[in-house]
Image (cartoon, rainbow, N blue to C red):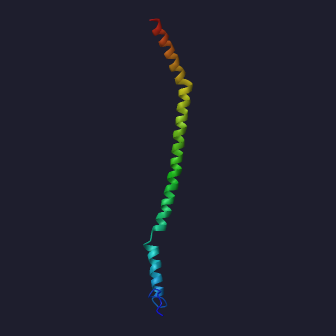
Amino acid sequence: DRRRDSPATGSPIQPIIKDVGEVYSRLLDHRPVIQGEIRYFVKEFEEKRGLRELRVLENLKNTIFDANERVLPKCEQAMQDNLSETFKR
């Protein structure tokens, strides 16, 4: 008929054990705080990273547009001029 509960069940020491557990969780168990900090860091990192990548893509788009609209026609014209001069020689 012996019960297999914890030895402090029903004894006057049970509230003390409960208090010690609460003190431990408040003072020494930092997992909830650390998990919150990790979530905050990841959120901030992803937002800043997303903005940085957006700026990089925007700069890349502008560079490609500039190359297609200005640089490429100038290069083609210079190539045609130099090629026709070379053929004449």
Q: Is residue 79 above or below residue 19?
A: above
**Residue positioned 53% across, 41% down in the render:** 55
Residue furthest to the top:
89
Q: Nearer the viewer, residue 6 or 43?
A: 6
Q: Is residue 15 above or below residue 68?
A: below
Q: Is residue 16 above or below residue 56?
A: below
**Residue positioned 48% across, 60% down in the render:** 38
Residue 40 position, x and y percent, is 51, 58
Q: Is residue 67 above or below residue 53?
A: above
Residue 21 position, x and y percent, is 46, 79
**Residue positioned 52% across, 19% down in the render:** 76
Residue furthest to the left:
28
Residue 75 position, x and y percent, is 50, 20
**Residue positioned 48% across, 66% down in the render:** 33
From the image, which quarter does the C terminus lie in? top left
Residue 46 position, x and y percent, is 52, 51
How many numbered markers are drawn?
Answer: 0
Residue furthest to the bottom:
1
